[in-house]
Image: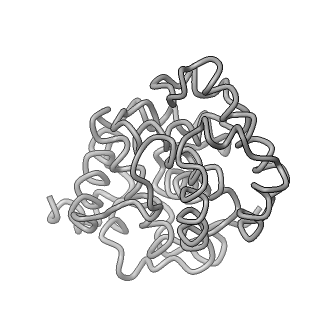
């Protein structure tokens, strides 16, 4: 496999299917023991942590959630809180006004419409206030091990475009492109590995192309600093 990756002839001519296989295997090897950065033990904790992670670092979320779950370890318990109480606990996560309102409203809906449990389908989960498709994909995979799709954040979108896996800047279109070329059983793990890869290697401003095993099949390799020029 790695002889293929290191073969410069493949850089522009490799098929999309072959490229997807090489990307999958390279990231599985690089991040063989990758684990989610968010600390969560069940679907409810995954839902709360993922909502809090919007425009916030995972490290900060992980400092907030132990205090949150000491008080509200179930949706039912959260329904007894006020928005102001929730805001005081999650304030350091940023956007705390909207996050507090959405978490409380989601808890009420979970209690009233889903028996107090986080639903297992993306159609049901995206009915919850503040839960869009990206968040739902993270919760389904993290909380239930369900591979429903890709959570396309800035890292996954950027890597997909640079590698030529998708040409779109629309996260939902990127997701549809990715689910067509990668096996479903790999979606969640690959999604997580792509995020780490985007943070560590293929970052926005200083991609480390010189130490990237995918540079041989990457049309964007070595083109920095114009990679992300708008």
**Residue at figure coordinates x 44%, y 75% from the top left:** 201
In percent of width and height, residue 122 lies at 53, 25
Q: Is residue 49 above or below residue 75?
A: below
Q: In this view, does 69 lie above or below 109?
A: below
Left or right for 25, reference 42: left
* Colour scheme shown: one colour
Left or right for 136, reference 79: left
Front one among 136 and 152: 136
In percent of width and height, residue 188 lies at 37, 44
**Residue at figure coordinates x 56%, y 62% from the top left:** 65
Residue 61, picture quadrant: bottom right
- In the rendered image, which quarter contains the N terminus? bottom left
Front one among 90 and 228: 90
- In the rendered image, which quarter contains the C terminus? bottom right
In percent of width and height, residue 156 lies at 52, 53
In percent of width and height, residue 153 lies at 59, 52
Left or right for 77, reference 29: right
Front one among 14 and 2: 2
Q: In this view, does 26 lie above or below 111?
A: below
């Amino acid at each position: 496999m790695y002889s293929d990756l290191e073969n410069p002839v493949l850089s522009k001519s490799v098929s999309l299917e072959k490229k997807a296989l090489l990307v999958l295997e390279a990231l599985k090897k690089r991040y063989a023991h990758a684990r989610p950065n968010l600390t969560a033990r069940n679907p409810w904790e995954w839902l709360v942590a993922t909502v809090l992670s919007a425009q916030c670092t995972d490290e900060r979320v992980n400092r907030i959630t132990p205090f949150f779950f000491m008080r509200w370890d179930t949706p039912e318990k959260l329904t007894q809180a006020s928005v102001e109480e929730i805001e005081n606990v999650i304030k350091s996560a940023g956007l705390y006004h909207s996050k507090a309102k959405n978490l409380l409203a989601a808890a009420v809906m979970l209690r009233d419409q889903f028996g107090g449990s986080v639903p297992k389908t993306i159609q049901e989960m995206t009915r919850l206030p503040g839960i869009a498709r990206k968040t739902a994909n993270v919760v389904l995979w993290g909380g239930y091990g369900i591979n429903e799709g890709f959570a396309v954040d800035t890292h996954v979108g950027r890597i997909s475009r640079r590698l030529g896996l998708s040409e779109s800047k629309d996260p939902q279109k990127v997701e549809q492109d990715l689910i067509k070329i990668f096996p479903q059983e790999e979606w969640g793990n690959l999604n997580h590995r792509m995020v780490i890869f985007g943070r560590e290697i293929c970052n926005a401003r200083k991609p480390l192309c010189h130490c990237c095993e995918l540079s041989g099949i990457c049309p964007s390799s070595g083109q920095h600093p114009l990679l992300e020029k708008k």
